[in-house]
Image (cartoon, helix red, strand yellow):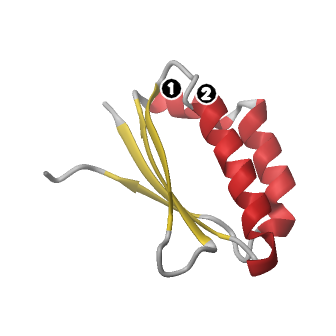
Amino acid sequence: MAINLTVILKSKPESSAILKSLLLDLVQNSTKEAACLQYDLHQSEEDSNIFIFHEVWENEAGLQFHNKQLHLISFFENSRSLLYEAPIVYRTYKLA
């Protein structure tokens, strides 16, 4: 069963450009994973410090594999000081 995630990250205003660059690198690496069905990055039009991921993973095993990848672990280590607050993660299911 596919796993759907929405992840919201808010950067500190002075760190937005750096965070955006790290997020784009994360997209490049994560989309190479076999279980990655969708990994879309969005930026809010109203607040350029807010970034939103919509992710779809093939299954739970694929998501767990992703969570252990060096590129994801490194991202969180390198972005900690750039974030205004901890990322918000919603695990969802598609209604329509």
Q: Determine whether the residue tagged by mark 2 lies in a helix, strand or loop.
A: helix
Looking at the image, which residue is at 63% across and 74% down?
Answer: 49
Say which amino acid is labelled 1: Ala
- Point out which mark residue 61 bears: 1
Return the x and y of residue 65 as percentages of the image width and height.
61, 27
Q: Is residue 64 above or below residue 55?
A: above
Q: Determine whether the residue tagged by mark 1 lies in a helix, strand or loop.
A: helix
**71 or 13: nearer the viewer:** 13
Q: Is residue 32 above or below residue 67?
A: above
Return the x and y of residue 64 as percentages of the image width and height.
58, 33
User: Which residue is situated farthest in the top direction here?
Assistant: 34
Mark 1: give few (<14), some (14-19) or many (20+) Cα within 10 Å: few
Quarter that holds the N terminus:
top left
Image quadrant where residue 37 sits: top left
For the residues bearing labels 2 and 1, Cβ distance under 8 angstroms: yes
Looking at the image, which residue is at 73% across and 69% down?
Answer: 16
Which residue does the numbered mark 2 point to in the structure image? 65
Return the x and y of residue 41 as percentages of the image width and height.
51, 51
Image quadrant where residue 19 sits: bottom right
**42 or 83: nearer the viewer:** 42
